[in-house]
Amino acid sequence: MPINNAQELFVHNLSEIYDAEHQFVQGQQEMAQQASDQDLKSAIEEHIGQTEQHARNLEGVFEQLGQQPQRATNEVAQGLVSSAQQLMQQTQDENLRDCAINAAVIKVEHFEMGSYRGLVSAAQQMGQDEIVDLLQQNLQQEEQTAQTAEQSAPQLLQKVM
């Protein structure tokens, strides 16, 4: 489907991150089941609820635009989820698996932060203040999750050493 203007590009990007959030809920559920470190498991479980809220916020963005929520397959998200699944299967040691899970979380969060930053910038340019607020909420939580995962990486790695 051709994209002919900035609004259509925005909706396409919105549809992709909407799809990604749905894919990441499923991926996080698998990660939470596989995690052995209780802090990591708790952080992932907490973020699952946030991710579900992110999808609801995106539904609010679609509503503000007068459109039905739609998912456009996000191949980057598919790749990130698939890569995490493969790593979890390949790591036999539970502490090493926790490191792999945490690294996957960091990759996902950075992808999401980049996606949301682009959407926030576009919404600002379009003068869509209510949409900016919804997207900023998601962005801030993604930044917090990335920071938590990055700060926990040394402790998780220390368990492996």
Image (cartoon, grey):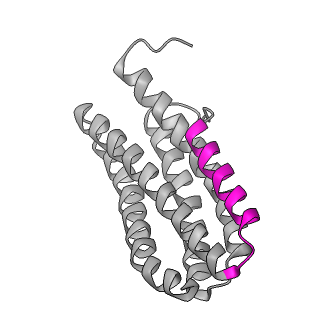
Residue at x-position 43% and y-position 38%: 64
Quarter of the image that includes the C terminus: bottom right
Residue 4 visible in rendering: yes
Left or right: residue 42 compared with residue 146: right
Query: What main secondary structure does the magenta stretch of the protein show?
Result: helix
Residue 75: image quadrant is top right
Relative depth, front residue between 68 and 103: 103
Relative depth, front residue between 12 and 106: 106
Relative depth, front residue between 9 and 27: 27
With respect to residue 93, does 23 lie above or below? above
Residue at x-position 37% and y-position 71%: 147
Residue 6 within the magenta-colored segment of the rendering:
no
**x then y, percent, for residue 95:** 63, 82
Residue 69: image quadrant is top right
Residue 69 visible in rendering: no
Residue at x-position 58% and y-position 33%: 68
**x then y, percent, for residue 80:** 59, 50
Number of labels in the image equals 0
Left or right: residue 153 compared with residue 99: left
**x then y, percent, for residue 152:** 45, 80
Relative depth, front residue between 100 and 75: 100
With respect to residue 63, does 140 lie above or below? below
Residue at x-position 51% and y-position 80%: 157
Residue closest to the far front: 161
Left or right: residue 23 compared with residue 128: right
Residue 81 within the magenta-colored segment of the rendering:
yes
**x then y, percent, for residue 143:** 37, 63
Quarter of the image that includes the N terminus: top right
Residue 104: image quadrant is bottom right
Which residues, given as a range, are shown in magenta? 75-94
